[in-house]
Image (cartoon, rainbow, N blue to C red):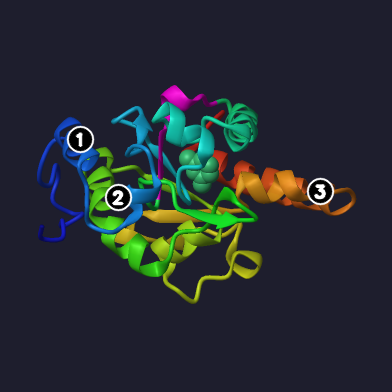
């Protein structure tokens, strides 16, 4: 498949056709660990696209992104700026769940660069159809996929940066990272996320 031109509206198959094609995706080996493809969901007319890392265990069961504990955090973040999932397009850098077996248990793991590259075509199709005016990158994996491999979440979150197709990108921490923190680091990180969300609201001119 050729790479889509993000400036060209409605590149390639429709979003629904791409979703169907992605069900049988074998562009990398992740289909072997994931039960199903977890394509993006939400509003195809969204102004805001949220991009996470990869489907986790719950998402692999439901077929929907952010359907587990990270999703509950994300819902609260959206509520903070007066949005719901129905207002945004929510997707991931890769569309199958990456796993690793540790102590006999299958666990989530971040996608490898090669897996993210192989899956990029689906993200680009989503970007070209939704054509968001702003992207919120959730965590370092999404930041690297959108802003380059030198991206550092601790240094570059909370700023408006030029992303793919010149779409502005704001990066913030990944909800799963927040879930792992304890006080006082938890409150410090939550404050930074709130600042990042307020910036998203201002960029989208929500409430003005
Ligand atoms: N669920 C997702 O869909 N993406 C993440 O990055 C984490 C959990």
Q: Can the viewer see residue 203 in this picture?
A: no
Q: Which residue is drawn at 57% across and 25% down?
A: 82
Disc number for residue 15: 1
Residue 165 falls inside the magenta stretch: no
The image quadrant where one finds the C terminus is top right
Q: Which residue is drawn at 48% across and 51% down?
A: 53
The residue tagged 3 is 186
**First along the sequence among labels 1 and 2:** 1
The residue tagged 2 is 123
Compared across the picture, whether 187 is left or right of 162 comes to: right
- The quarter holding residue 126 reads top left
> What kind of element bears circle 3?
helix
How many neighbours does mark 2 have within 10 angstroms: few (below 14), some (14-19), or many (20 or more)? Answer: many
Residue 88 falls inside the magenta stretch: yes
Nearer the observer, 80 or 151? 151
Q: Residue at x 15, y 57 (%)?
A: 5
> What kind of element bears circle 2?
helix
Q: Distance between the residues labelled 2 and 3?
A: 31 Å
**x and y percent of residue 43 in the render?**
34, 27
**First along the sequence among labels 2 and 3:** 2
Q: How far apart are marks 1 and 3 (CA)?
A: 37 Å
**x and y percent of residue 143 in the render?**
48, 61
Q: Which residue lies furthest to the bottom in this view?
A: 150
Q: Can the viewer see residue 191 in this picture?
A: yes
Q: Residue at x 61, y 42 (%)?
A: 197
Tally of numbered tags? 3
Residue numbers of the magenta segment? 83-92
Label 3 CB less than 8 angstroms from ligand 1: no
How many neighbours does mark 1 have within 10 angstroms: few (below 14), some (14-19), or many (20 or more)? Answer: many
Nearer the observer, 16 or 37? 37
How many neighbours does mark 3 have within 10 angstroms: few (below 14), some (14-19), or many (20 or more)? Answer: some
Q: Distance between the residues labelled 1 and 2?
A: 11 Å
């Amino acid at each position: 498949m050729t790479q889509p031109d993000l400036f060209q509206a409605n590149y390639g198959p429709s979003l629904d056709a791409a979703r169907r094609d992605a069900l049988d995706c074998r562009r990398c080996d992740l289909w072997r660990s994931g039960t199903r493809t977890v394509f993006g969901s939400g509003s195809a007319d969204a102004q805001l696209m949220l991009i996470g890392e990869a489907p986790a265990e719950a998402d692999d069961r439901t077929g929907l992104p952010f359907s587990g504990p990270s999703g509950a955090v994300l819902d609260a973040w959206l509520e903070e700026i007066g949005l719901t999932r129905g207002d945004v397009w929510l997707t991931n850098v890769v569309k199958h769940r990456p796993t690793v077996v540790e102590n006999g248990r299958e666990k989530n793991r971040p996608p490898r660069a090669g897996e993210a590259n192989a899956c990029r075509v689906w993200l680009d199709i989503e970007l070209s159809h939704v054509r968001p005016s702003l992207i919120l990158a959730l965590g370092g994996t999404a930041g690297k996929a959108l802003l380059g491999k030198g991206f550092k979440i601790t240094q570059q979150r909370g700023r408006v940066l030029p992303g793919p197709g010149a779409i502005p990108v704001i990066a913030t921490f990944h909800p799963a990272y927040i879930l792992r923190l304890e006080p006082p680091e938890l409150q410090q990180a939550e404050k930074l996320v709130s600042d990042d969300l307020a910036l998203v609201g201002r960029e989208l001119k929500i409430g003005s």
